[in-house]
Image (tube, grey):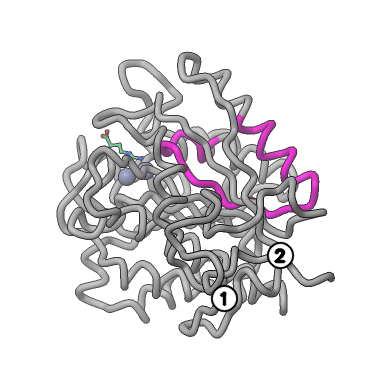
Amino acid sequence: MSTPIGPVDATKVPRYGGPATFARLPRLDEVSRADVAVVGIPFDSGVSYRPGARFGPGHVRAGSKLLRPYNPALDAMPFGTQQVADAGDLGVNPFDIEEAIGTIDAGISALRADGAQVLTLGGDHTVALPILRSVARDHGPVAVLHFDAHLDTWDTYFGAPYTHGTPFRRASEEGLIDLERSMHVGIRGPLYSKQDLEDDAVLGFQVVRSDDYEVDGVASVVERMRRRLGDGPVYVSVDIDVLDPAHAPGTGTPEAGGLTSRELLNTLRGLVGLDVVGADVVEVSPAYDHAELTAIAASHVAYELLSVLALNRAG
Ligand SMILES: N=C(N)NCCCC(=O)O
Ligand SMILES: [Zn+2]
Ligand SMILES: [Zn+2]
């Protein structure tokens, strides 16, 4: 492998300048090939409460300018031992959700066909369904590791099947997920009824609650997670509202009592060695953010995921 083109050197161009790409990385058209493509999906037509996640990709990129090359927590060089590039944003129809879902599937599939793993910046959580369709076409049913305050396995909203609260029910119905190996992490807050949890278990998910972090701690969560996910392919979906609103106010359906960013980042580090085949970070809504708190948290989530991919690639 030729030496990857990394971020613009911060000793030459200060961090507040330079390109608006994720982590000031090269654009995809500036590299011959990418091991990992970071792609934005500016789409929020599936939200049930506050809008604005369509502006998430640009905001997360802006919040990623301070990321540095070396990750001491994992002893990893996420931009140094693999080529990561910014693939820009997919152009999706905001007025026709089913068309948007088709465009997302095609866009993700094209990047993957070129040999890149894809890390998606949302966008609302609807986008996870077409990404999983693309991933499962190659890998078969994958374990979904889903970080979220919410189950996102509800059936419909106002009769609509494709929304940000329903992607994992559709994915389960379509046979895209491994029913024995999938799980939610960070679940909390009021539900519509007790039945929600019963349905969710049938759809293939185990639940690690936000409170389990308080009671058992990160190490125990990581152990449960690794046991459940096992050896096969894993898709990681991070709804930034898994974090407490104190850590991530800029999101559409905030719930009190969430994870700290430290807990989330440490949990993600526990994925080293598992077969992570793709990931997303969704539900960043900048209009509700303050001081880039949510964008910085989301960019660090992406950084830890890229670090895991880098270490796994190195073996
Ligand atoms: N933030 C996501 N993805 N889902 C929230 C759906 C919760 C609701 O509207 O009842
Ligand atoms: Zn959520
Ligand atoms: Zn969600």
Magenta segment boundaries in residue numbering: 104-129
Q: What separation in Å lies between label 1 and label 2 (alpha carbons)?
A: 23 Å
Q: Quadrant of the C terminus?
A: bottom right
Picture layout, residue 306 above or below residue 199? below
Report the residue at 40% width, 36% height from top: 55
Q: Nearer the viewer, residue 207 or 135?
A: 135
Residue 198: in sight, yes or no?
no
Q: Position of residue 83 (x, y in %)?
A: 71, 63
Marking on residue 272 = 1
Mark found first going from the N terminus, 1 or 2: 2
Magenta stretch encompasses residue 116: yes
Mark 1 residue's CB less than 8 Å from ligand 3 = no
Q: Position of residue 229 (x, y in %)?
A: 54, 65
Marking on residue 5 = 2
Number of disc labels:
2
Residue 153 position by quadrant: top left
Q: Position of residue 288 (x, y in %)?
A: 23, 41
Report the residue at 73% width, 59% height from top: 35
Picture layout, residue 311 above or below residue 258? below
Question: What secondary structure is found at the residue carrying circle 2?
Answer: loop
